[in-house]
Image (spheres, grey):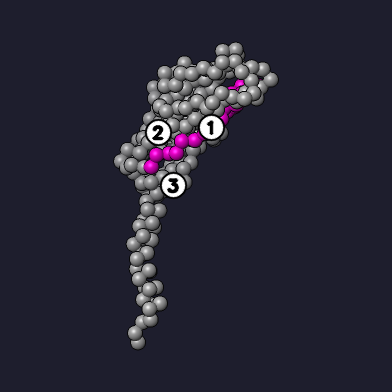
Amino acid sequence: MPRTTAEQAFRWVACACLPALLLCTATMAMAAPLAIRIEKRDGKPLNGAVLTLEAETQRLPAVTPVQAIVDQVDLSFVPDVVVIPVGSTVSFPNSDAVSHQVYSFSSIRRFQLPLYRGKPYPPVMFDQPGVVTLGCNIHDNMLAYVVVTDAPFFGRSDAMGHWTLPDVPNGKYKLRLWHPLLNEPAVEREIEVGSAPADVVVKLSRALRPAPISSRPHSWDY
């Protein structure tokens, strides 16, 4: 019995969509979860470590820049560590009861926001990867960091030293670790992500530097 026009159209659409469906399914299958645990030299978890994962064998889409905020509350920067993609901006409002003067002498981004309260200056652009140290010319104990990265994956370890990524495309990566109290050369690891979930443990070879004495704890203190 000859097929109707509607049946023929259905078969044509189904055949045309099948390659795209198979490609989508294959792409989804070519990614796997990645679980990383960061340990101090004594084996205890390291909280607040900044972690970046750079692709070495494949090209991944660039991360879209963001608009971050670092506020000033109770003579502290909040948050005291922010990780952002290259090209992002950061606003520095002052919600404190006193005036502050925010500055950075870091080579990748030097700037100074003269004494102010309340409404912030225009956002500051960060267009180079690296670590920017923030301070206040009025209050020496105020300290924070802006970590700028061009890596497709980045984040911080939690209280148990864990950083988990649900879907990492298969391939080889370089894991880099940064922490304000790190007391050794750059910590890097080569990681290969396959079709199965991967678990990686990174243990520091040296003890961290002592945390600075301050009446206001930082997110990286231990």
Whether 64 is among the magenta residues is yes
In this picture, residue 165 sits left or right of residue 102:
left
Rendered-image quadrant of the C terminus = top right
Measure the C-alpha gap from mark 3 to mark 1: 24 Å
The answer to which of marks 3 and 1 sits earlier in the sequence is: 1
Secondary structure of the residue carrying tag 2 is loop
Q: Nearer the viewer, residue 217 or 154?
A: 154
Q: Which residue is mark 3?
A: 167
Tell me the crowding category of disc 1: few under 14, some 14 to 19, or many 20 or more residues within 10 angstroms, Cα based. Answer: some
Q: Is 49 located above or below residue 199 in the figure?
A: above
- Location of residue 64 in the rendering, given as x and y in whole percent from the top left corner: 45, 39
Residues in magenta, as a range: 61-82
Q: Nearer the viewer, residue 185 or 29?
A: 29
Please state which amino acid type lies under the numbered disc 1: Ala
Please state which amino acid type lies under the numbered disc 2: Asp
The quarter of the displayed image where residue 61 is located: top left
The answer to which of marks 2 and 1 sits earlier in the sequence is: 1
- Location of residue 52 in the rendering, given as x and y in whole percent from the top left corner: 43, 34
Q: Which residue is mark 1?
A: 68
